[in-house]
Amino acid sequence: MAEATELTSDITIIGGGLAGLTAAIGLADHGFDVTVVDRAAQEALTDVSYDGRSSALAFASCQLFEAISVWQYMEPYAQPILEIRVSDGPSLLHLHFDNETLGDGPLGHLVENRHTQIALFERMKELDNLTFLAPTKVADIKRDKASATVTLEDGRVITSKLLLGIDGRGSMVRAHAGIPTSKIDYKQHGIVCSIEHEFGHCGIAHERFLPSGPFAILPLTGNRSSLVWTEKSHLTETIMGLSDRAFQSEVQRRVGDFLGDVKIIGGRWAYPISLQYAHDYVAERLALLGDAAHGIHPISGQGLNLGLKDVAALIEVLVDARKVGLDIGSTQVLDRYAQWRTTDNASIYAITDIFNRLFSNDIEPLMLARDLGMAAVDKVVPLKNFFMSHARGTVGDLPKLLRGEKAL
Amino acid sequence: MLNEESNNIAESTAKGATVDLDEVEFFAKIADSWWDPKGPFKPLHILNPARIGFIRQEVEKHFDLEANLIKPFEGLRLLDIGCGGGLLSEPMCRLGADVVAVDASEKNIKTASLHAEQSGLEIDFRNNTAEALAEAGEQFDIIVNMEVIEHVADVDIYLSACRKLLKPDGIMLLSTINRTAKAYLFAIVGAEHILRWLPVGAHDWNKFITPKELAAFSEKAGFAPKAPTGFVFNPFMQKWSLSDRDVAVNYAMAVTAD
Ligand SMILES: Cc1cc2nc3c(=O)[nH]c(=O)nc-3n(C[C@H](O)[C@H](O)[C@H](O)COP(=O)(O)OP(=O)(O)OC[C@H]3O[C@@H](n4cnc5c(N)ncnc54)[C@H](O)[C@@H]3O)c2cc1C
């Protein structure tokens, strides 16, 4: 049967990654007709070799997944984070956050990105106002006062009121709109792998500040953890080239022995790390979300959480606009999204940047200062609560979805 | 203080236009100015969400509609009087209403039609008056009568035409400016002279109507008026909100057929 070559929907999304599909599902769940385009096939996006990362999903992000009925498909793979321990390499002084202090359930959950992506596809099947076109390539984008038109290489044309660029760091949509970015290259890579270990992790996430950069041990379901090992870029290639045995012993050395013997499971991945942000989040009939708008250092495990905040804020802005019959792609409506998100994101860029600079070196006085600083923060309850609420993602002017409510 | 008929800006463009200027292009330019949220009609764009929120709330209550519908006005015939560039007509159409929009200015009607067509909306725009429509025996479930009454020559004649236009179980939403010292400061001194939101002389303070007078005029024309709702402006948020208590400047009133 011949496929329709002219499609119309309320919203077209380029990029069906974690943020893109969450946006698509959230919008469809709120009654908008959505078309999503990705250059990678669904099978590729959920393949074991595609993304080895696991994400620490803040409590607020889990609320969003719950509100749009995705959480049920993720829950079996979600490991609650009960405690976060931050320590400075060999130093004994440390900072420690646990859910008792806030008394409001876990700080968040760790889920392998692959399982989140699969859960999103499961939920997508239930929504008949959501169309997923992949693998396919975008040949052309046109935007004017009234609409945005996306032409695919296979000749199909999608017309809608609003185009969303959720196509990651190298966003083609952003480039098409000529939106400039600023970038700081940290000359670091994030080496990612999963391990199986002898002893249980008790739901504790560890962040250690080693001289080459932060090293995170994040608890997964069962006796497994996900590692993010930040390394100087010029050393990354060597480490990635190590034999399995040599790599495993390097990992064991860094993890220490509190988990007993560790064994690498699955592959290893290396991601270049930079801070990058778009100067504008919106243009005529266009909005950027997720990494396309901002990519930050994984030090705080906030990248995806920020993208999900974009998603929740945009859905609320669009639902509010529809309630009073406004054009969802008009400047007036998009400006509200941009304003809401830029203020919030700017402070996160600054905090993670300062953290990384402070912790990625071994200059004596700095080490002492941050040790004392951490010990001090650990003693002062209000300060701790401040940091914890940040980790849970429950600060700022929260969109309804992040409070677990629908944006009606 | 806000009114869609006082588009002197567009009027002066008309005089300056050369004869051979393509008509569509000409009206497209005016539409651009109407629809630019930062342009000459900025105050209307800022007020729009609040006044549509009011209309929606009153219509939902009156027809006992389900909450949170995407097209709550589906199946209802709506008349937008003094539609200007269509800033209210288009949202009403998106909310599902079957919209007829009238304006005494032909230029406004051409501008509004062009914009609605570009937006893919079907709205019946007519260069006509409420009085003529009443004469022709047209009737509507909803009449939106926003920021018009302070500009009409004879309120009694105007409202009795509106009364004829309303179906027996219909509802009409009126909004206007109160005749208080605060309204004088805000609408005339503030909006016209200081903020230059509107051309000087756009309003005549003596024509402003108090909620009590509006209720009396409505009753005389055969309507049953409800309690007024105020629009309150927050200059820091650049946002209007609805208030049950503060009706000192801009306010709205729902009336039904008596
Ligand atoms: C080492 C590391 C660890 C991290 N850990 C965490 C963590 O613990 N917690 C956290 O919250 N975040 C974490 N992050 C950040 C997080 O992974 C990202 O923020 C998140 O994946 C971004 O999602 P996205 O959907 O915006 O972009 P992406 O995941 O990059 O998705 C983009 C999608 O767009 C598609 N696409 C791209 N270009 C085109 C095109 N031209 N046409 C069509 N489709 C296109 C791609 O195929 C892809 O599906 C980490 C990042 C790194 C590097």
Image (tube, rainbow, N blue to C red):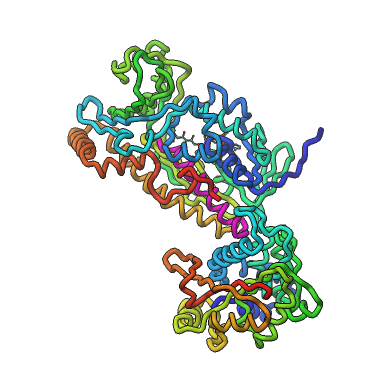
Question: What residue lies at 69% left-to-right and 64% top-to-bottom?
Answer: B115
Question: What residue lies at 29% left-to-right and 30% top-to-bottom?
Answer: A85
**Image quarter of the N terminus of chain B:** bottom right
From the top left corner, tell me how far across and down residue B164 is, in percent.
74, 77
- Is any part of residue B119 visible from this angle? no
**Which residue is nearer to you in this view: B165 or A277?**
B165
Q: Is residue A313 in the magenta section?
A: yes
**Residue A144 lies in quadrant:** bottom right
From the top left corner, tell me how far across and down residue B203 is, in percent.
56, 84
- Secondary structure mostly taken by the magenta-highlighted segment of the chain: helix
Q: Would you place residue B108 above or below residue A22 in this image?
A: below
**Which residue is nearer to you in this view: B36 or B24?**
B36
**Residue B212 lies in quadrant:** bottom right
Question: What residue lies at 37% left-to-right and 15% top-to-bottom?
Answer: A197
From the top left corner, tell me how far across and down residue B251 is, in percent.
53, 74
Q: Is residue B125 in the magenta section?
A: no
**Which residue is nearer to you in this view: A57 or B37?**
A57
- Is any part of residue B67 visible from this angle? yes
**Residue B91 lies in quadrant:** bottom right
Q: Would you place residue B5 above or below residue A211 in this image?
A: below
**Image quarter of the C terminus of chain B:** bottom right
Q: Is residue A279 left or right of residue A354?
A: right
Q: Which residues are magenta?
A: A301-329
Q: Would you place residue A341 above or below residue A131 in this image?
A: below
Tag count in the figure? 0
Q: Is residue A102 left or right of residue A146?
A: left
Question: What residue lies at 59% left-to-right and 39% top-to-bottom?
Answer: A25
From the top left corner, tell me how far across and down residue A192 is, in percent.
42, 24
Considering every residue shown, the one lying at the far top of the view is A245
